[in-house]
Image (spheres, helix red, strand yellow):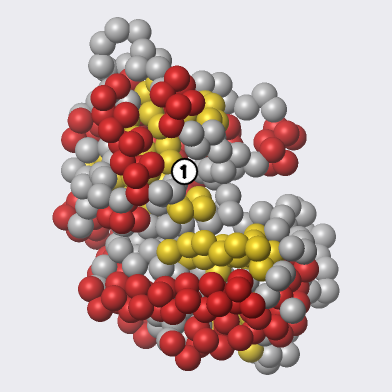
Amino acid sequence: MAAPLPTTTDALVGVYRKPPVEFVRGAGVELFDSDGKAYLDFVAGIAVNALGYGDAGLEQAMRKALDGSLIHLSNLYRTQAGERLAEQLVKKSFADRVFFCNSGAEANEGAFKMARRWGRSVGGAPKHEVVSLRGGFHGRLFGTLAATDRPQYRAPFRPLAGGISIMERDLDELRVALNPETVAALIVEPIQGEGGVRVLERAFLQELRALTQERGILLILDEIQCGYARTGSFWAYENSGITPDILTVAKPMAGGLPMGAVLVTQAVADVMQPGDHGTTFGGGPFVSSVALHVLDRLSDPELLTSVRARGDELRTALVALQSSNGKVRAVRGMGLMWGIDVAEPAKDVVARAMDLGLLICSAGEHTLRLLPPLVISRGDLQRGIDLLARAIG
């Protein structure tokens, strides 16, 4: 085993507040620190480690991906794995074409560029504006930061990118804001993860789809956190009965390797010309080979059935916890993605949970967030619920 890290280091830029715990290995749905203590993981790398830790199939896929000794070639050349992955994503979604990148923020930046390129192609004055919703989180790059509703993240970096605005989750206001002459796209998270795990109602999403279609505006769905089986359907949009024009996905795509994607209709793909966008690493042969395995696993009907079953059990337990504990103000979520509003600062509950051997994270000053691996068993789920109740007090 490697020697433990020092208590602190000055070598990293200090943009994260990290607890003094060093994790050295994982197994199933648990992580182990350098002292051998086990922690039940209800964070999953912020919804990335959907298959947990030490998954035999994922490890085999990584070894197999190395057989041809092709880790990277760049997008100047064709490789089979990336093309096969794109074909499978098209087959399993609304989309006609796919663009690969390396992260969720990059996927959303790419979606914004595609929307603006499309907006220049539809006649009249170029449609260039992008509208997002209150509570949305779409990334920390300049374009995506302008669409992200976190004042504390935005303030140090003003002025932000222009032509991007945040509107209330209100249909009357959106009918005014979605000007068909100037707005190219509306971006929406079906479940706002960082914004408090807020599930947007089915009827609301259907109204947005109808409104954008009526006005000739693209609908971008950001499923970076809520897509890829997290809700119990492979795509979150399936729960609302709509399809977007553009969809962004990232976190669990390649089992912990960095990968993102932009899925688009043919109408959007047709406006993109060689040189309009690019990436050095996106869709490389190694990461795409691993992502093919993850896609096959997470779209398996048996796994989706299990996620729905565990999600129902988690909902029942959290509702019971709310009814019996005055410190729990609200619970909301879907599948294995839940938010819990608590009376005290969320960070205090997160710290106590860690002491008890449970990893959870926050989604706001008073909101806890639960994102366990999608392969969690009923027993481990119940164990986590019991630890959570103790941490809340």
Which quadrant is home to the C terminus?
A: bottom right
Pick the quarter of the image with the N terminus.
bottom right
Q: Residue at x 52, y 61 (%)?
A: 332
On screen, residue 72 above or below 303: above
Q: Which of the 4 image quarters holds residue 277?
A: top left
Q: Residue at x 43, y 86 (%)?
A: 377
* x then y, percent, for residue 211: 32, 29
Q: Which residue is mark 1?
A: 106
Q: Is residue 16 left or right of residue 202?
A: right
Q: Residue furthest front?
A: 323
**Which of these two is toward me, 87 or 355?**
355
Which quadrant holds residue 127?
top left
Marker count (numbered): 1
Residue 351 place in picture, x, y as percent: 75, 73
Is residue 122 in sight in this rendering?
yes
Q: From the viewer's perspective, tell me whether residue 349 is left or right of residue 186.
A: right
Residue 29, position as x, y percentages in the image: 50, 83
Q: Amino acid at mark 1?
A: Glu
Observer-nearest residue: 253 or 216? 216
Q: Quadrant of residue 156?
A: top right
Question: Can I make out residue 51 in this image?
Answer: no
Dot 1: what SS?
A: helix
**Nearest the eye: 337 or 36:** 337
Q: Residue at x 37, y 85 (%)?
A: 56
Q: What is the crowding at mark 1: few (fewer than 14 residues within 10 Å), some, or many (at least 20)?
A: many
Q: Position of residue 17 (x, y in %)?
A: 76, 60
Please name the residue shown 22% across and 45% down the image. 95
Describe residue 149's horizontal placement relative to residue 98 as left or right. Answer: right
Q: Is residue 243 above or below residue 338?
A: above
